[in-house]
Image (spheres, grey):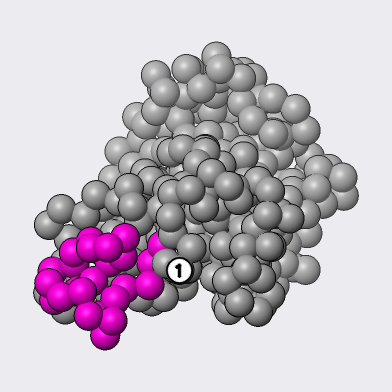
Amino acid sequence: MNYWLHRISYHYEVSRPLLEKNILSIGWADFSEEQYITKCVGHWDIFEKSFKDAGWDLSRNRYSLWRFLSEMKKGDIVLVPSWGTFSIFEILEDMPYSVEKLDITNLYDLNGNKIIKEDGCLYKNDSSSKDNIIDLGFFRNVKPVMLDIPKSDYADQSLTARMKIRQTNATITDLAESIQNAINGFKLNKPINIHSLIIEEANKHILSLIQTQLNPDKFEYLIKWYFEKSGASNVVIPSKNERDKEGDADIIATFDNIKTIIYVQAKYHTGETTEWAVEQINEYKLSKESMDDGYAKVGWVISSGSDFSQKCYDEAKSKHIILINGKQFATMLLNVGILGLENAF
């Protein structure tokens, strides 16, 4: 499967309504006999000779016709740029067809003129005078994949640059990933966002530093600093030898303004975190819920690891414990900013 860019700016007033009927078009009406397709498609030497026989210069734009007739195939993807947007289509047949086989029932141009087919050509205003001829000669049936994607929101730098080329069409298979990302982003209503891209890239490095440069105690102090940076009224790391405690909490963050206390179990490792962390923090939270202090009690598990086991997820859901893995915590650090991080330890 190949990817193509194809412009319909030539006779746009007609090519646009045709595309809305899922018909992709190109000019060259002088060659638009059906026998031309049979004779020339796939045969470069005959294709070249047809230009010479017609008295045409061998200009570079003939390559656009060749690509449209001979190189585009069924299943290929075509990007059609427009003003501020672009649309994606899939080609439905291997072979193109000429205006002789074009069915244009009830076709009107963008100005409301009826388009008719007469003497093997397209005309507007129900007149076959040369002044009203529409120079569109060849067509391909397509089906829409995604329509009217805003360029500014969903085309990355490479795709945006390629859509600025001036030729009628070009192969853009090297940009397949960019095109698919644009389709998926538009489908999910997730435009390209520089903040999200920076976060996604940076948190990989932050997580790696956390996993390789810290230790369990420093990880706890990093979490303590995060809560302080987030506006906690008070953050403490309880003594490991706390008497008569049930369960375990490594950090306690109090937010007076919202009457909430967060109890955190910190797990410093690189692999999966098990359900034992949930059990520890849940027991500790339950032991504090009897305190009549007017504060809501919330349990968190923050891990430097890659993820949590499925049993851990199940336990957390049943006990209403919030799980935060290493990547999520790295993103949380980025969101509060790293100014003052040197004071965390």
Residue type at tag 1: Asp
The correct choice, above or below, for 83 with respect to 22 in the image is below
Residue at the image point whose x is 18% and y is 67% from the top: 115
Taking the image as shown, residue 292 lies to the left or right of residue 106, namely: right
The quarter in which the C terminus is drawn is bottom right
Residue 126 appearing in the image? yes
Residue at the image point whose x is 20% and y is 74% from the top: 128
Taking the image as shown, residue 123 lies to the left or right of residue 113, namely: right
Residue at the image point whose x is 67% and y is 42% from the top: 326
Q: Where does residue 261 sit, x and y in percent of width and height?
A: 43, 46
Q: Residue furthest bottom?
A: 131
Residue under numbered circle 1 = 30
Q: Residue furthest front?
A: 53
User: Residue 8 or 172: which is nearer the viewer?
Assistant: 8
The correct choice, above or below, for 25 with respect to 72 in the image is below
Residue 185 appearing in the image? no
Q: Where does residue 319 sit, x and y in percent of width and height?
A: 41, 22
Magenta residue span: 114-137
Magenta span has 301? no
Residue at the image point whose x is 69% and y is 25% from the top: 272
Q: Where does residue 236 sit, x and y in percent of width and height?
A: 60, 50
Q: Where does residue 223 sit, x and y in percent of width and height?
A: 64, 50
Q: Residue furthest right?
A: 213
In terms of image quadrants, where is residue 175?
A: bottom right
In terms of image quadrants, where is residue 136?
A: bottom left
Magenta span has 133? yes
User: Residue 343 or 137: which is nearer the viewer?
Assistant: 137
Which structural element holds mark 1? helix
